[in-house]
Amino acid sequence: SMVTIFVLSLIGAAQAQSLDGKKVGYVDLSRVFDDYTKTKEYDAVLEKKHTAYEDARNKKMDKIREAQGKLALLKEDEKAKLQESIEKDKADLLEFDRQQQTELKKQRDEKIREILLEIEKIVHDFAEKEKFALILNDRVLIYGEKTMDLTEKVLKLLNDSYSPKK
């Protein structure tokens, strides 16, 4: 059929292209991202920020719990006043949660974008220098010869180029 002929001609063209003395390679992007020193350092920073947030949140929760524990011991008018204070603290806690989570997510997303751009630049420069026609993300691969795997080279270039800001 025409479709078969068309598909076969495409396959033929693709093979001709790849055997035309051009270099092709692929990179395990997830591994490069995870094993990049900058990613590891940032993970530690994020962990610290998250722990600080959890600590602050727990203090606020304890304050609310403590106040709720006192409620039963109070006279009616004092009880109403404390209940009002508890409601305000609960509302503050919800706002604190929302604000902190939004901020942490924003910082994380910005850092991920920054790191991916750095990886992209390293791969781009490497491809130009080493005369690669094509470097793929291994996620789109069904098969790739081990000799075409550039992950280690790219990872080394990336980590060698990274100098932490003191």
Image: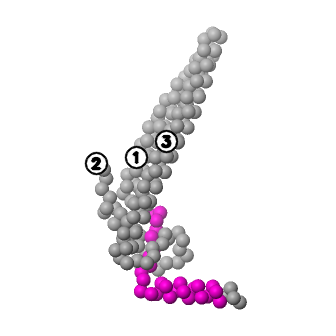
Question: Does residue 137 lie above or below 112 as drawn?
Answer: below
Taking the image as shown, residue 161 lies to the left or right of residue 133, namely left
State the residue lying farthest toward the right: 1
Query: In terms of image quadrants, where is residue 52?
Result: top left
Q: Position of residue 135 (x, y in %)?
A: 45, 73
Lower position in the chain sequence, tag 1 or tag 2:
1
**In the rendered structure, which amino acid carries the disc numbered 1?**
Val
Question: Does residue 37 lie above or below 146 as drawn?
Answer: above
**In the rendered structure, which amino acid carries the disc numbered 2?**
Lys
Residue 43 or residue 164, whichever sits in front: 164
Spatial CA span between label 1 and label 3: 14 Å
Residue at image coords 42%, 81%: 23
Q: Is residue 35 visible?
A: no
The image's mark for residue 166 is 2
Query: In terms of image quadrants, where is residue 47?
Result: top left
Spatial CA span between label 3 and label 2: 24 Å
**In the rendered structure, which amino acid carries the disc numbered 3?**
Glu
The image's mark for residue 45 is 1
The image's mark for residue 103 is 3
Q: Position of residue 60 (x, y in %)?
A: 51, 29
Colouring used for the render: one colour
Q: Secondary structure at mark 1?
A: helix
State the residue lying farthest toward the left: 166
Residue at image coords 58%, 24%: 88
Spatial CA span between label 1 and label 2: 14 Å
Residue 39 colored in magenta in the image: no
Q: Position of residue 21 (x, y in %)?
A: 41, 86
Residue 30 colored in magenta in the image: yes
Start-end of magenta stretch: 5-32
Q: Is residue 27 visible?
A: yes
